[in-house]
Amino acid sequence: MTRRSVNGEGTGVNNTTQNGGHPGDTPAPKVEPDAPNGKVELRKKVTLLRGISIIIGTIIGAGIFISPKGILKNSGSVGMSLVVWIACGVLSLFGALSYAELGTSIQKSGGHYTYILEAFGPQMAFIRLWADLIAIRPAGLAVISLAFGQYILEPIFMPCGVPEIAIKLATSIGITSVMYLNSMSTSWTNRIQIFLTFSKLLAIAIIIVPGLYMLFKGETKNFENAFEVSNIKLTGLPLAFYSGMYAYAGWFYLNFVTEEVENPEKTVPLAICISMAIVTFCYVLTNVAYYTVMSAEELLASQAVAVTFAGKMMGNFSVAVPVFVALSCFGSMNGCLFAFSRMFFVASREGHLPEVLSMIHVRRHTPLAAVLVLYPMTVFQLFVGDIYSLLNFMSFLRWLFIGVAVLGLIYMRYTRPDMPRPFKVPLFIPAIFSFTCFFMVFLSLYSDPVNTGIGFAISLTGIPAYYVFIVFDRRPKWLQDGLDSFNRSVQIILEVIPAEH
């Protein structure tokens, strides 16, 4: 048997004199006994329940509890805002169904990156990856983490405000604990995600049940003239849809971990459909509950809608609401990181990122380097960067690339008609959804051309980066030796080796 070298060659079987090794050989790292055939690989541990918890747990963040007012503000009436919530749920389901087809026909992890790579080639996929790595993912993770830091401390500091430095320290602890959890165990990451998903569904039930009880008791005054034409703002409707689609964003995260899903042909479409039905149902009924207890004016004036609602309905119990919001944010952080790390893992495997990111911990079977790569950038942006400006620059890019990925589905129907498609959607579904995505990009350009232009400029730096790092790979020998040495050092420190197939 050959000894596993630092480059991961060999069988991974411990070298001893009993199994044919030689005295003095370095033993290969111990492989856990439950590894199939002793292989070091990412296991298929995402069941239907875990898949549903990843999608619901990532979609439902802090927004529905804190600020579900963008839709009401831009639609102009209570009735119209509920119509927009339902319509955005249906449109998001169209996108989710399109991704269900992509996920079952291209059974690789990586989500948007993988589908753009398959449909339109490496350069377009690298630009998407570059924008994700340098800005979108660290900024997005930092923002949801800041919401966690804010709300976990709020009950302690009530009624005073929470100091800025305390929020950032709590946020850093939150990010570190999520990174640690994802580094240590895929199973525990998924178990905690299920618990957090149930906790946020419980929080939503605590809002919906008393709200509907009041509604059935005849508390309907806020629904009178719900569709009053004079209040409806047609010019604001596109912005209302933009807010709604953003609230539902997250239905695509299961596609980032397709390779770890049990029986993906059935599990991916089923998890997506069940999750979207639950989220749409929860969002619409939560808003109905809010409108039952609060007038439109009160809702727009509130800094944290769920806290105002709980204060009116439950008295002192409202102190518990920030804790539920913090748990909801933690669930979103956990789900996002679990998904992102797999995208970096796949990109490294495709040769678009350093090789060490596609390596797996020898005992824990987690993509340790891919999990940790976001940590320094997220913490740096947390303490140094203007995160919200960065997010404004980049948020439209999410819709641009999702639109491109769904367009890729239509494109591959014609260029690769023989591709196996265990789950196939009618063509009008991806057509309507990709049009919606491109419409939102156009809306961003129209309403905020400066920030959108800066976002485009940041993403286009991926073109020279692609040629410098990927195409022109003839590096000086000293530089290549230095990179190889660094790669080996990281492998040894993190105890990671290439995945076996």
Image (cartoon, grey):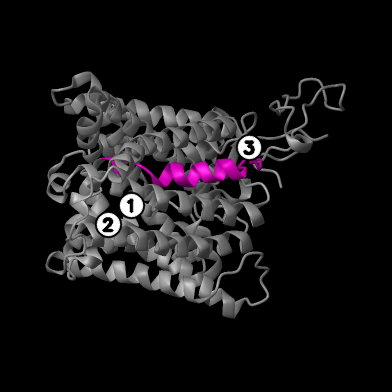
In the foreground, 118 or 187:
187
- Report the Cα–Cα distance between label 1 and label 2: 6 Å
Q: Residues in magenta?
A: 42-65
374 vs 232, left or right, is right
Q: Nearer the viewer, mark 2 or mark 3?
A: 2
> Residue 7: horizontal and vertical position, in percent?
64, 39
Q: Label 2: state its secondary structure.
A: helix
- Report the Cα–Cα distance between label 2 and label 3: 43 Å
Mark 1 and mark 2 in contact? Answer it, CB < 8 Å: yes
The tag on residue 243 is: 2
Residue that label 3 marks = 497
Q: Label 1: state its secondary structure.
A: helix
Q: Label 3: state its secondary structure.
A: strand
435 vs 151, left or right, is right
Residue that label 1 marks = 247
Label 2 packing within 10 angstroms: few (<14), some (14-19), many (20+): many
Mark 2 and mark 3 in contact? Answer it, CB < 8 Å: no
Mark 3 and mark 1 in contact? Answer it, CB < 8 Å: no
Which residue appears at 49% of the width and 29% of the height?
Answer: 181
* Mark toward the start of the polypeptide (3 vs 1): 1
> Residue 410: horizontal and vertical position, in percent?
52, 75
Q: Amino acid at mark 2?
A: Ser
* Mark toward the start of the polypeptide (2 vs 3): 2
> Residue 242: horizontal and vertical position, in percent?
28, 61
Q: Nearer the viewer, mark 3 or mark 1?
A: 1
Which residue appears at 22% of the width and 25% of the height?
Answer: 315
